[in-house]
Image (cartoon, rainbow, N blue to C red):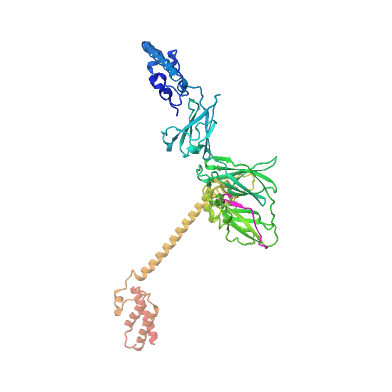
Amino acid sequence: MPEEAPLPHSKPLSTHFENRAGLQEGSSPTFREPLDPAAHTNPVPIAGRAERPLPAHVQPPGASGNGAGAGRDRGRMGDGLATVAVGRATVVASSFFCFLVSLPLHCAGQTNLKSPQDIQVYVVNTNFTLRWNYTGNDTNLTFLAEYQWFEDFKTNGTEWKELPGCQNTTSRECDFSSAITKYYDTYLVRIRAQRGQEVSPWSSTFEMIPYLIAQIGPPDIKLRSTNGAIKIKVSPPEANQVRKMWTDHLSFKYNVVIWENSSNAEFRSQSIFPTDIIDDLAPDTTYCLKVQATLVLEWKEGLFSPIRCVKTTRKVNDLHCARNVTILALNMKFYLHWNNQYKQHVSYNVQYLIGYLKKLHDDYSSKWLNVPGCENITDMQCNLSSIITATSGFYYFHVQAVNEYNKSCLSNEVKVDPLITNEIGPPDVKVDVSDVFLHIQISPPGGAQGEVMRDRYDLSYRILYWKNSSNNEEEIKMKQIKQTIGTVSDLTPATLYCVKVQAFSEVYNKTSPYSKEECIRTPGGKILPLIILTTFFIALIAVALLGTLLGFTLYQVYNKIKYVFFPSCQPPLNIEGFDQQPFRSIYLPATEEQIENCSVIELIVTEANQIDFRDDKYSKQSSRDSGNYSNDDDISGHKVSEETLAKEVG
């Protein structure tokens, strides 16, 4: 930065003769005689540099602007005037001494040369040019420049150095490319004019960071006309240079401007790869073009290449070539379709190229690969889903047709950027209804691939629902959601509602067709609670009846078991110990009783005269007794037994 030149009175007289009468390098003093002390309140800059204000003891009376201090100012007026007088004498003496001693040197470089103006630095690739203007009418001038380098963001730069290529030049520009090697550091540049021993003050300082002000240079291009098209090959800027401003040449994108070489030409601009083919051109026509390299991420546009012109040829029209090659893609399923005008036998090979290979500056013609399942086919379609498996990157496809004479022909190339080329299909929808809510469940488009599409496209859903009635003026309502489950409220009871859903992606500006309409009827208004209440009471009564029946059944079973196995009445003592036989239950099997009775009867028949019938009656009665042992029953039983036995004996 320019340094300040001290006032003449602020240094001893001897210092004015060092380095051309004591001046800082590049300064040009102006000696003024202060006719009035007030002149020091607003000192005039010396040679474009700001002067420092006078010391307080030199300030004129009242300079403080404070009325209260006027007395003090008047008190010092004598000292101030004395100091001014001393300064005036010093200036006069120095001027006289300068005139006597250094008259041939114009008083130590004092000159009327002006400083250069409008300092600019132009950077194209690694070529640096310094340009300036000079407004004076002086002749026989030369210019010299200096620079300062701030390395790695340091606040203190190196000393000012001579700028190579910009010393003693007579033109208004110079090339200093050899001096700059660090393109991300800060540099300062200044320049001044000189004529013999006279030098002008230094110009204002130009500050720069080379990479930020650099322009991209023009690329080199080569053209070749082939089959009605133009094949172009672009070499990046700085392709053959050792020192490079742009180290990543793969980041370049190229724009071409092409037009017919005629008076009413229309300009056409398009993006191209380093090696590309420009088609859709008129045959036998001269086209001119120029190419520009850009760095999109850094918002830098380069200079256009020199204009090149070439004449196109006629395109060979082979009937067996595949034509109208198109891509049909839905829900990440990709198909290539084409047709031709050839009626004879033709086989096809579908080939693909990974997109990034086109960004390279190499020939990619040998890097095309065949699509599996689409080799030597006769159908005019090919499933590309086995190749396009990733959603990032892009691909190129073309069709090679081979006729019965083994003559081949390549179709035009088609580009596939999966997420851009693909179209979104309609989602699947299921609808359910509750009391006052309509529940909508959405399946993303693509079925099993739905998750991929939902995540990559960041899908949202647009739900349309309306009352399906005879009134055509029913309002269609819309609701947008991000989730795959939506709910619609404020429904009218006992009404048929219809729903359809559309998927869309704001990021890719894509929308799907609407799904099929799904309709469902809402339940009635006041009837529904009554139905629910009635159902509840019917269920409650049924449970109560079932419980009662089950309880009664269990009670009866319990009584039977208790009566059989745990009877409440015991037989009389005389029966309990009769004939020393244990008491038997009346529920024992009847066959066992009959066998026992028969044996007893036979015994009675054979020995009737010897057996006491009374005793036998008791025995037989005891075997048939039902368990009631009252005296009346004993007597009646005894009589019946006697009559029966008498008949059997008689």
Residue 350, quarter of picture:
bottom right
In the image, what residue occupies the spot 39% across and 77% down?
589
Magenta highlight on residue 306: no
User: Which x, y percent locates residue 37?
Assistant: 42, 13
Q: How many marks?
A: 0
Magenta highlight on residue 414: yes
Which of these two is toward me, 545 or 113? Answer: 113
In the image, what residue occupies the spot 46% across and 36% down?
186
Q: Is 193 on the left-hand or right-hand side of 228?
A: left
Where are the magenta residues, as a range? Answer: 404-420
Residue 369, quarter of picture:
bottom right
User: Which x, y percent locates residue 245?
Assistant: 50, 42
Say which quadrant the C terminus sits in. Answer: bottom left
Q: Is residue 243 above or below residue 557?
A: above
User: Which x, y percent locates residue 97?
Assistant: 42, 17
Which of these two is toward me, 12 or 38? Answer: 12
Q: Is 579 on the left-hand or right-hand side of 167?
A: left
Q: Is residue 527 above or below residue 386?
A: above
Q: Is residue 193 above or below residue 40?
A: below
In the image, what residue occupies the spot 66% across and 45% down?
287
User: Which x, y percent locates residue 8?
Assistant: 41, 19
Q: Can the viewer see residue 436?
A: no
Which of these two is toward me, 194 or 39? Answer: 194
Which of these two is toward me, 59 or 460? Answer: 59
Q: Is residue 63 above or below residue 335?
A: above
Q: Is 357 on the left-hand or right-hand side of 37?
A: right
Q: Can the viewer see residue 82?
A: yes
Q: Is 548 on the left-hand or right-hand side of 464?
A: left
Residue 101, quarter of picture:
top left
